[in-house]
Amino acid sequence: MEIILNSELYSGGIGESFRFIEVECFTKKCCLIVGILATLLFFVLRQPIIQMFISDEEVIYYGVKMLIAYMLSGSVIGILFVNMNCMQSVGDALPATVLSVLRQGVLLIPLLYLLNAILGLNGVIYAQALTDYVVVILSIYLWKRNVCGRCVFFGIML
């Protein structure tokens, strides 16, 4: 993915908009496909993966729950990172920075407290996935605002 993103940044920086769009769409498709495959792999192998690191049954139980929760957004999180890189490559770094701060702080921390109060440990476990979906949707909106949604995948503008 790094080669693709570097090509994306290079193409955007020198004004080759057609190449930029082509690489952007290809990268997003790759992120979705790899994200879905990784999510399926981690879901199917969730218990053996946790057991590779620990043998305590209670820890395995919670580890499996946490791995499942973490992977709920695994299929789409790549879209966030591609959108943030695209924003930076066209000189619009502020929205990318805001998205990063929202994901790891401004949205996540209050959501951890709120969901903990409502759902207990399960709320804490699922807070990151919820935050990821909110920020992915916001990144799509912000990037579309910039470029009018040029990338379509299975009929969905990304």
Image (tube, rainbow, N blue to C red):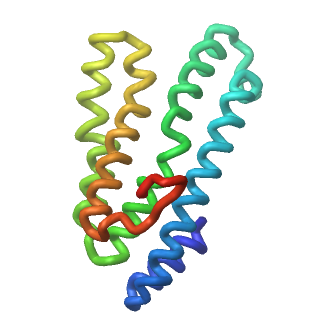
Viewer-proximal residue among 50 and 85: 85
Which quadrant of the figure has residue 64?
A: top right
Viewer-proximal residue among 43 and 28: 28
* Residue at position x 41%, y 53% in the image: 80
* Residue at position x 49%, y 46% in the image: 76
Q: Where does residue 150 sit, x and y in percent of width and height?
A: 40, 68
Which quadrant of the figure has residue 31?
A: bottom right
Q: Where does residue 28 sit, x and y in percent of width and height?
A: 52, 60
Which quadrant of the figure has residue 4?
A: bottom right
Q: In which quadrant of the rendered image does the C terminus lie? A: bottom left
Q: In which quadrant of the rendered image does the N terminus lie? A: bottom right
Up/down of 66 relative to 80, above or below: above
Q: Where does residue 38 sit, x and y in percent of width and height?
A: 66, 42
* Residue at position x 63%, y 8% in the image: 58
Left or right of residue 32: residue 44? right
Q: Where does residue 63 sit, x and y in percent of width and height?
A: 60, 21
Left or right of residue 33: residue 7? left
Up/down of 112 relative to 28, above or below: above
Up/down of 45 relative to 14, above or below: above
Up/down of 99 relative to 56, above or below: below
